[in-house]
Image: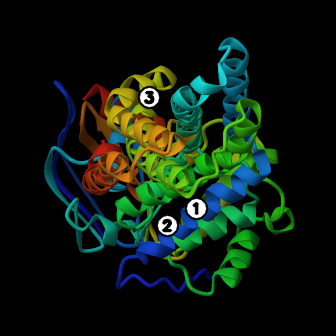
Amino acid sequence: MQIQAAVNRSQPSSYLKTIGAIVWKDLAAELRSRELLAAMLVFALLVVIIFNFAIELQPALRLTITPGVLWVTFAFAGTLGLNRSMAIEKDRGCLDGLLLAPVDRSAIYFGKAVSNLAFMMIVEVIVLPVYALLYNVNLFQPGLLLTILLGSIGYVAVGTLLSSMAVQARTRDALLPIMLFPVVLPVLLAAVKASGGFLQQVPMNTIWPWLNILIVYDVVFTAIAFMVFDFIVEE
Amino acid sequence: MISVRKLVKRFGTKTVLRGLDFEARQGEFVAILGPNGAGKTTFLRILASLSRPTLGDLQIAGYRLPAQAAAVRSRLGVVTHLPLLYGDLSAEENLRFYGRMYQVENLNERITEVLNLVGLFQYRRELVRTFSRGMQQRLSIGRAIIHDPEVMLFDEPHTGLDQDACDMLDALLRNVAALGRTVLITSHDLARVESLAGRFDVLSRGVITSSVERSNLGQRNLLDFYRGALVN
């Protein structure tokens, strides 16, 4: 049988199409298995519930402690998701399959990062109402939601890069948090401070510096990942 | 089609390839034989641009590695003992994903064509994780030819397959090679590659130590040639 395929080899695959293909693949696979989202979601809800019972909070204290509990929850659940997302690629050799494609390898990074961000945001969308209900705190404020988005982007930008390094090691499950948390500390700190500011309704000029840190961190680490991903994944 | 000069690959202080020279013409089917640890997989991974050479000059289809890696990758199909497939996607969805990554035009028609070639059209909507090892390996070949590559690299494709699955795989390999593609295969199964390849190169201690055309094997069988090459 004659096999011929019309392939456009004169130019590299369109960058956005590559990102779209990877995101479609990750979402389609996750819709079937639900193993990644289920693990993240159950873990996040358990953390929120355990904190609720472990800490007897006075109503006045709730607003102070809420940002910390919230970001600890997102960070731990996010680590679970990042680990699993890359492990799926590695275990059946699929990471090699991606790297064999004639595409700019940074597009692979962005595809995985967008997928990871989507999973993290799905978890956040479900956890936020549960948290608001349990702790009797209004979390649906535009400023707070913006902070959660910026913090999640920074967390995923670094996490996707580091998980592609950690996945090469046998001890990847332990290695990722050890590498990730020190690097992502500025994001968590800024996100907790900005979130606390919005919840306690402090003046915007107190919150802006923390939002600026988040924006700068997002831009800088996305740019770093764009530049170094190819070297990280190649032997 | 493939030209390799003085290829060296080091991992830290360990040198795996030590100035390897290799040539393969268009349409040639070459088996690379060698003991465990000889550097066969490392060699194929460098050709596939999954690993960067430490030293050496490599060209595939007129493009240099690693400088023109994307152009090389668009002309390569790679099959390993791992399927490189997503278990939670169907056969059709896996091919669609890789077809999009390679920017294959008329993708629906191409997917149908490839699924028919590897004999999995009737299973196209089933999840890959429900496939047997043999079916996964056939689909893996479908994945590797979805973009009609000029060069095919097979790294131990028979690993983990039963007798029937190996026979089906061999038939498919002959079919793939018959279309004028350049094919490189590594294998420990000498009896199988003896009937497949047209040339046999022995890789030992990081260099090609011997090479013979199948037509020049004469009365010797491949095992005798292989043992002789390792002794020398």
Q: Relative to the observer, which residue lies in front, B137 or B170?
A: B137
Q: Amino acid at mark 1?
A: Val
Picture residue at 37% right of the left edge, 47% below the top: A207
> Which quarter of the rendered picture does the N terminus of chain B lie within?
bottom left
Q: Relative to the observer, which residue lies in front, A31 or B228?
A: A31
- Residue at the disc numbered 2: A19
The reply, left or right, for residue B114 in relation to residue A203 is: right
Instruction: Check the residue under mark 2 and report the chain it is in.
Output: A
* Chain-order first, disc 2 or disc 3: 2
Q: Residue B184 placed where, x, y %?
A: 42, 56
- Residue at the disc numbered 3: A176
Q: Relative to the observer, which residue lies in front, B37 or A22?
A: A22
Visible in this render: residue B43?
no
Visible in this render: residue B82?
yes
Picture residue at 67% right of the left edge, 57% below the top: A27
Disc 3 crowd, CA 10 A, few/some/many (<14, 14-19, 20+): many
Q: Are marks 2 and 1 in contact (CB under 8 Å)?
A: yes
Disc 1 crowd, CA 10 A, few/some/many (<14, 14-19, 20+): many
